[in-house]
Amino acid sequence: MLDESCESSDGLDNIFSDDFSKISTLEEAGGLPTLCGICEKPFTNPVILSCLHIFDRECVRNFEKNDSMVPYTKCPRCDTLSGSVRTLEAYDLSVAQTRSEGDGSHKVNGAAVKCSVCTDGNDALYRCLHCAGTLCERCRDIHKVMKVFSNHEILDLTEEEKGNAEILQRNMLNTKPVICTIHPESTFTSFCLQCHIPLCETCFECEHKGHITILLGLVPTHIDSLLSDMVECCRLRQKDFRDSIEMMHSLLSELSSSRDANKSLINKTCKQWITSIERIKDQFIHKNREIHDELEMKIWSRINTMSKTVDHVDFACDFVKVYLKKCSNIEICKLFKNVLACFDKLSKQQVVNDPSAKAVFSPGLSAYDVIHQHFGTFSFTNGLEQDLQQVSNSLLEGFPAPNPHIAVLSSVGDITNDLKQLTLKVDGHMDPDPLSGLDHSVTVHLPPVSLVQQDGTCENINPSAVGNGNINNYISRSSNSGASGRHNSNWCDLNVTLPNLEPSDFLCNVTQVDPIFSNPFITTDNLRAPGSNVSTLDVDSSLILKQKLPVSYNATLYEYSRMRAARCSQMNLLTKWGSLGCELGRLNSPHGFCLGFEEEIVVADTYNHRIQIFTKRGDFVSFFGVSGRVDGLMWYPRKVAIIRQSQRYVVCDRGNERSRMQLFSRSGHFVRRIPIRYIDIVAGLAINQHGHIVAIDSVSPSVFVVSEEGDLIRWFDCSNHMREPSDVAIHGREYYICDFKAHCVIVFQEDGSFIRRIGGESITDFPNGIDVSDHGDVLVGDSHGNRFHIAVFSRSGELLSEFVCNQTKVSRSCCLKITTEGYVVTLARSSNNVLVLNTLYIC
């Protein structure tokens, strides 16, 4: 034990070696504070936040918030979120202070270390691990004979300890047993390299078995290389920030010249049109000033943000160099996670370099009657103004209304609330037509349909020959009906991108299909043609559609299914796979799925504690996840989603709490845990257009928007509008949330404002899956009546069509996704199946 503590002392010294760019002492650098930055008084009971800033505990209580969730503390200096005040680590003033003299047991001006037990002033020759003090020869003899000291362990002082009181004190602190906070009957003995926390023997056996651990004495040696590299990385990034700040200051002078040049050019243009544009001249000058004010504000905000980052790097380095050096091993263990997270955050800060910042006024020549519209425009010459492509023109009388889309100014790291609230106008961007890339040479065949034209007459489309067993025979050549129909895909469309797949391969996976449904003459699939006025319902279905079931639902489930099938178009089951089991490719009560990066099907295999990935045909591709409650493992995963921006998976499972959110790389390696203690049960999971994670709580209906780093960006309460959320889909800035118990879909703006309610009883009964096509059509799925049913709505809430699959029984379906080919994928939880269906509907 003595050798290990000596080794740990040497390792700790290496951490604060010449690897750091700053080697001055604490007093010379002035890095660590001696006064509270809030009350500006000497520390009385200081604490360390997760960002490593230090304040008095009582002062920090004013910055602790709850917001109807778990308490958290926002740093008053950098706005970084930490845990509640009671969970913050204490800041040991005695470690930070440089002691100029000892307390009687240390070496003072070359004097030998004295015994700390007796008052005789004898030289210390031994030290007691339990008393954490030094002993002379006489006191050691007393320790041997008295029963009260029978369990104490006594070590001889080394020559180094006899001559250096600091080494002696550190060794005594490191060897003193510390009681485990979870298991009071045990003491900390090791450090988990995967979880970054100290462990006792009970902790290791219960929750960390199989993890990589080291003895406490080896902790300083281990973190030496880690922290040295991260500090060096942050120092290099700090230099980039300083260079960028200098360049930003030069941009300010260029903006001043740009303002004057534009003003002169505007005045010159006004003289050419002096008879007609005298009134609007001042308006353009005002606009010029407003644009440059916006640019200056943005540059200053970036300077302010990067300056904070520079200061934060200095402070964090001083903290590691000065404070952590004097901490005991157990204190280093407690702070190591925060220190590592802080340097990781600082090392990932992005430096934004803009070569120039100018807003150039460009005059335009035009006739007298259009001078107002063609007086001139402002063009931008750098990336700094990408968020300013369209500044508000409300000051210019008669100009078009500004674009309603608002973009919040994104910052480099954490900035103040005022800078976060700086909003600038930008142009909206519409995604290109997803069908534009399709090979239109592919001939698409449709089953027989009945279309109602504007005059009310019904034109029948006769099918071609009917076959048995092959899916190609289900499809007949489309005839010229005179109506402009949308392209409709079937599994044969996969040949455009997947030439090795044959349509018959999918049908062979469909089992237990009633032969009566193989006859295409009974199908009445409805088509919706964009740009035409042709109704999507046949004559009989349009009459039945207006009827609704009574609220009491007195009809039997069979009658309900029959009535629903009578008014709905038929969906063809293309493939179905999955069975109960724990082998790869088998499922056990899956609760959610998503479409992967290449549109593979990613299933949350809940009771097998893993994520499985399949092709659309049902072939097993890969899996990741191992059963366990600790971070990095999976415990009943319920929901999964992908973040395309960072190529990562988001998995919601239970863990040690009711809900846990974890990030995994595309290859399935654990990245980090995202704290969501304020969510009870995640009923829906999606990714918005900004790459943020949107999670729906079904216990207390609420929407939470979280970043990948775990920051809570926005949340709002939905309980006034819905009863039990079951799934969510996002289209643009609108959130579509299924209400399972209210039989409808609620639409919210991303800021939480209620927009509309879609569907109702007998149309969307117990909805449990939703998706929005690229064209904005809303597909709502349910399995009420043991038949999978889809209702298609426009974004305004108008019912467009309904589909039902009678080829297989579907119970407790969950989730719904639309592929690029227009096929619908859903999950049958009770039967452990994944179903792929063709609605003859192209999104």
Image (cartoon, helix red, strand yellow):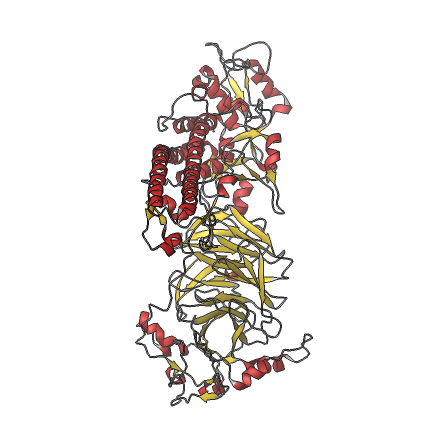
Residue 180: x percent and y percent?
57, 37
Relative to 2, 554 lies left or right: right
Q: Quick one: which residue is furthest to the front in this view?
A: 275
Viewer-closest of 399 and 64: 399
Residue 89: x percent and y percent?
55, 33
Relative to 40, 386 lies left or right: left
Viewer-closest of 519 and 120: 519
The vertical placement of 9 against 306, above or below, is above
Residue 673: x percent and y percent?
49, 48
The vertical placement of 30 against 419, above or below, is above
- Could you say which quadrant of the image residue 356 lies in? top left
Q: Is residue 519 visible?
A: no
Viewer-closest of 587 and 556: 556
Relative to 313, 39 lies left or right: right
The vertical placement of 38 against 486, above or below, is above
Residue 634: x percent and y percent?
50, 54
Q: Is residue 777 visible?
A: yes
- The residue lying at 41 percent from left, 89 percent from top is 462
- The residue lying at 57 percent from left, 14 percent from top is 138
